[in-house]
Amino acid sequence: LDRLAFGGVEKAKKLFNLSVADPTAREESKETCKRAALTGYLGMAVLAAAQDTNDFVMNQGNSLLANVQNARDLFEGINGGLNPIRNNGEFVPNSSFASTLGAARRAVDDARSSEIEFRSEKREFDRRKAELRSELQSQRAQFITPLKNLTGIDPAQYNNLANVADQRDYRRVVDGEIQRLIDGYPNVSAAGKGEYGAQVIAILDAAEAVRQSINRLGNLTEANAIARWANAEIDFKNDTARKKLRANDISRGWANMVSVSGTLFPPWASSISVSPGSVISGYLNAEDRDIQTTQQAEVSDIQLEAEIKKAMLEEGNLIIDIRRAKNAMDQQRLRLEAMVAQRDRLIEDLANARLTAENLYFQDPSFRVVVSSAQRRADGELDFAVDRLFRLAKTLEYEWTEKYQNPVRIPVGSDEPPALENPLFDKFTDLESLFTVRTADESKDYLDALEAWDSKLRRITVTSVRGPNHAGPVTADPISVRETILGLKTTGPGAMTMAQSVAAFRDYIR
């Protein structure tokens, strides 16, 4: 769009200059101005509708505006009757050839110097604009991409956080997604939540570790209670069995104390013996049962006490585990807070970087003022050089009494080749070719072509009616019909006023 609009303006300028020789080119130049301005305006409308200020500037929006302004100025100048070549329209030059040539050379030199300065400023402009583009692109690598990796939400969906409202909406959405994950996990998937999602899961896992350690401590206390209950049950069962065995041992001792031998009938045939040691043995066995039962109970109590002490040692470790799990959970929470703070810093840094880039563009003179001024100066100097070259070409045509053309008309018998030797001159076939000049270097080529044309005509040695080969001297002084022929002079002896001279000349014409 920028090149199309710029090309339209340049085409209109060339057509306007060509209107010196072709009056129809003037109207065509006006129409071209309209098309160029419309192209630039529509281009700006397209850019402004879909892009922000930064993108508009980066996509040559200001250049399009300049093209529209240039087309408007040229159109208004043409409508105002501006002469494409700023002279008085005289065919006969009113200054010497040397003066005209010197003015043309100075104008071409100034145009080339201005163009070189503009190119230098343009290169600086392009370099700084490339730096600006790199700065804007680096913002994605430094801020936008890390934000997406951190939160799982692309800031591009929120205008790359270009303003405060976008930043507020982005924070609100991110915080809402994280809270929803916390409240609904594992029923809510952590996929697409970025590093935030992984960190939330880490916090939830740390909380589960705390609950697991607390549960282990509770289980250990419950295990001790179960062990005490089992020991008491064992003691009760042992005591019950001991009492029964004690009774059995005593009963057995009494039963074994009396023994009968022989037959019961007749009684005199039987014998009865009594053994008191059996009773004593029964009581002693019962006592042994008591000792063994007591010993077993004491051993069980000792074992239970040992297990309880071990459990108390393990309970201390479990308390430490709970504290460590709590510390780990706090660490994960702190890391999440740090990630939230990192998100806010990235958003702020992005805003500051964008502001710095805007200041770099809008405040650095080399971006807007210097390069624009250099371009305007170069364009003005080139237009002036074209004007001086036009005067020089007309003067040479007057001197040689023929139109400039390439190739040159060569008289019969001359060995001089008709074409100008330098290939750079081939595109300058006539005087109007001057209006195809687009750069100061091309204006220098046109000046060199005129000098080559003049030199070629001077090298033709065949008798000719061409200017410097005339038999008599040729003067560059213009001849006035009113003053020189009719004697209606405004200077010297018998001079009259300009108004009287013009009135008398009009009477003569009538």
Image (tube, rainbow, N blue to C red):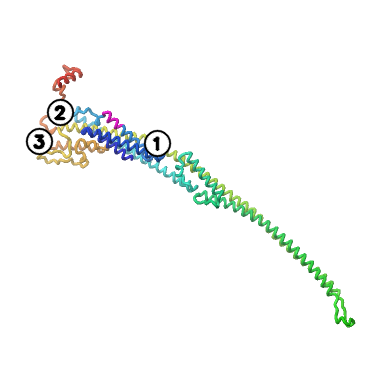
Q: Which residue occupies the extreme right position in the image?
A: 268
The answer to whether mark 3 and mark 2 are in CB contact below 8 A is no
Q: Nearer the viewer, mark 1 or mark 2?
A: 1
Q: Is 498 one of the magenta-colored residues?
A: no
Q: Is residue 499 left or right of residue 216?
A: left
Q: Nearer the viewer, residue 126 or 60?
A: 60
Marks 3 and 1, how far apart in space?
65 Å
* Image quadrant assignment for residue 386: top left
Q: Residues within 10 Å of mark 3 (few under 14, many from 20)?
A: few
Marks 3 and 2, how far apart in space?
20 Å
Marks 1 and 2, how far apart in space?
56 Å
Name the amino acid, label 2.
Answer: Thr
Name the amino acid, label 3.
Answer: Thr
Residue corresponding to mark 3: 463
Question: Tag 1, which secondary structure?
Answer: loop
Q: Residue 48, image x and y in percent?
A: 39, 38
Specify the principal SS of the magenta part: helix
Q: Residues within 10 Å of mark 1 (few under 14, many from 20)?
A: few
Q: Earlier in the sequence, mark 1 or mark 2?
A: 1
Q: Is residue 100 shown above or below 276?
A: above
The magenta-colored residue range is 73-81
